[in-house]
Amino acid sequence: MAPRKLAAGNWKMNGTLTSLAEIDRLLADHPAPGCDVLICPPATLVQAMAAKGIATGGQDCHAKASGAHTGDIAAAQLRDAGASHVILGHSERRTDHAETDAQVAAKAVAGHEAGLVAVICVGETEAQRDAGETLDVISAQLAGSVPDCATAANTVIAYEPVWAIGTGRTPTSGQIAEVHALMRDRLSARFADGADFALLYGGSVKPGNAAEIFAIPHVNGALVGGASLKAADFGPIIVALSAA
Ligand SMILES: O=C(CO)COP(=O)(O)O
């Protein structure tokens, strides 16, 4: 099994019910994309998004199955609302909520137990890159955030350099290639099906740079923030991935 190609949109804390018109446009413009397409809206929209017939993911889940955790969402609740995936360990969660690798791994286990595919995010800060620590940081995050029960079927890895998120800056193709090759090596060393995990790049992916990014070895798709909000932007990214 080769890795599946996945165009994933992360709406972050954007969108209300009226935003679903963009999904109607996306589905009308791209009825049979040549890649998997996933949208991860805010929790309030998961059920309505899934009802559109598009693969839907949450943006976080709790490590526990249920209980007294006000404001949190259990993986089984996302699944119940129609989600098939959950983003975990996004840098905004790691920064805003001080999430650790161990917590991300525990959430991934909870996601797997509920039948969700975990989209586990890793990425270095600009200071870490400037200090030459990128490969060590990514290795450590992979080791700590990806649980032993991960398989290519239940886990996707997203490389999102923190300094490239929402900034319009992207790494060079060589820099992305270096990290993706490292991730492939690390996963292959640890998991029998490590060669088959889908590896996404995320951070200022736009229609104008998508084709170049998708041509990089071991880039199997993208995790797209801002450009996933509008069908006119996300559509061309889906087309570029389908053609890659
Ligand atoms: O964080 C991201 C996706 O999870 C990337 O966001 P942008 O595409 O807006 O840079």
Image (tube, grey):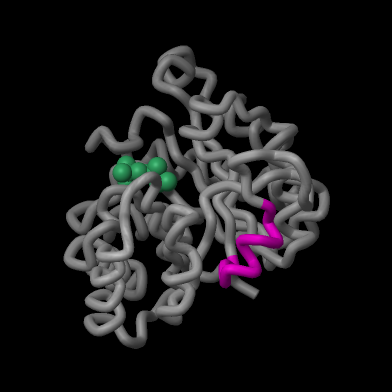
Side of 49 where 151 appears, left or right? right
Q: Residue at x 59, y 45 (%)?
A: 88
Give the number of marks: 0
Give the image location of residue 179, x and y in percent. 51, 39
The one of 178 and 68 positioned closer to us in this rendering? 68
Side of 154 where 170 appears, left or right? left
Within the magenta stretch, is there residue 44?
Answer: no
Side of 163 where 227 appears, left or right? left
> Looking at the rendering, which quadrant does residue 198 occupy?
bottom right
Q: Relative to 147, is 171 above or below?
A: above
Give the image location of residue 199, x and y in percent. 53, 54
- Residue 173 visible in rendering: no
Q: Residue at x 59, y 24 (%)?
A: 98
Q: Residue at x 44, y 21 (%)?
A: 129
Which quarter of the figure is the C terminus placed in? Answer: bottom left
Give the image location of residue 161, x and y in percent. 43, 34
Q: Residue at x 45, y 23 (%)?
A: 125
Q: Which residues are magenta?
A: 74-84
Q: Relative to 27, is 114 above or below?
A: above
Q: Relative to 22, is 71 above or below?
A: above
Give the image location of residue 141, x and y in percent. 64, 33
